[in-house]
Amino acid sequence: MGFLASRFVEWKRFPELFERARPAWLLAALALQALKYFVSAGALQRSMTAAGFPVPVPPLVPAIIAKLFTDQVTPASGIGGTLVVGKALRNRGLSRGDATAALVVNTLAFYAASATAALIAVAILWERRGFHPAITVVVSLFAIYAVGMPALILWAYHHPPRQLPRWLSKVPGLDEALKWFREAPNEPLRHRVLLAQAALFQLAVIALDAMTLMVLIGSLGHAMNYPASFTAFVLGTMAGIVTFLPAGIGTFEAGTVGTLRYLGVTPLEAAIAAVILFRGFTLYLPLLPGSWITRNTVNEDGDRAPAPQRVPPR
């Protein structure tokens, strides 16, 4: 992305682009991101219901923000953020096994939603432009990841090893995650309706992020095209995931900007400016509250609520 920017971007146009950004549209993008946290908490709430512990959605929002912060600063494919949410659930009185069961349902729902979004994006791309070789590579790698990770999670959930191979033991948080797996019950995975509901919530999170990108493109004075914004966001996310970098720094931006240009919906400068704004809303803006919540409220050693009574899902 840096090479392309240095060769083809007219940098003198960026101040004009940002000055032209409409405040009302920026507020709309902020509202979409706030809604996203509640929808993501809704997915976690469905997962907790599957584990037998239905709770209201709003109290789960801080844990979601803390997860986002942790996932951004640790290159561990979401393991670090998942453990942070697990600790938050333990502070609500859940046992380590019950918290793990809820998180496994939530994680599987995430992968199901990601695979569904990928199929939709591929269909849009195929219908509009076909595949560029670089896109084919990204989609192929993501397909392996989207199948392999859930399979690995399910295997580890049912058959957690007592000791990891040396090369796997270096993955941050993986050894602790497997310890949690050993205490988790299997019943929550049988509640397919709740799993499907959680996946729909996760798909809505993706849709809201794509809508935020579309609104930010519109804020710069360019025509909004939701299918193109959705495809660009999903392909950028794929590129970020398969590189295993924290928050996909660099690769997400390159994938998203490249797809927007490939689909021909915005000039290069506008695509870069929109993605910079998008990263500001989704990556940098939540860092401060995420850091505070992680340090002050999501702490395994802090005071825990009394253990809640299990309520079997209907």
Image (cartoon, rainbow, N blue to C red):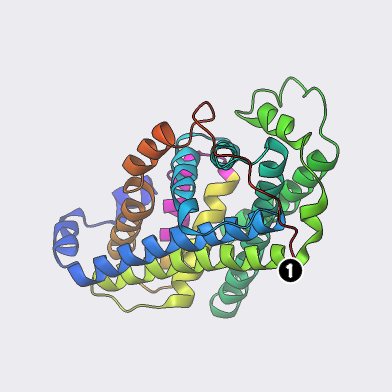
Assess whether residue 246 is covered by the magenta stretch: yes
Q: Name the residue under label 1.
A: 193
The prevailing secondary structure element of the residues shown in magenta is helix
Residue drawn at point x = 57 percent, y = 62 percent: 202
Residue 258 seen in the current view: no
Query: Residue 160: x, y in percent?
Result: 81, 34
Q: Which of the two residues, 286 or 84, is positioned nearer the viewer here? A: 84
Viewer-proximal residue among 157 and 96 = 96
State which quadrant residue 291 falls in.
top left
Expressed as whole percent of the image width and height from the top left, the position of residue 273 reads: 28, 59
Q: Does the magenta stretch include residue 170?
A: no
On the picture, is 213 further left or further right than 20?
Answer: right
**Residue 270 showing in the rendered view:** yes
Residue 83 position within the rendered picture, expressed as x and y whole percent measured from the top left: 59, 37
Residue 111 falls in which quadrant of the image?
bottom right
**Mark 1 crowd level (few <14, some 14–19, many ≥20, 10 Å Cα):** few
Amino acid type at image mark 1? Val
Q: What element carries label 1?
A: helix
Q: Residue 64: x percent and y percent?
A: 48, 49
Q: In this view, does 226 lie above or below 247?
A: below
Q: Which residue is drawn at 38% across and 74% down?
A: 265
Range of magenta residues: 243-257
Going 40% across and 39% down the picture, which residue do you hit?
Answer: 293
Residue drawn at (86%, 37%), measured in percent from left and top? 159
Q: In this view, does 111 lie to the left or right of 202?
A: right
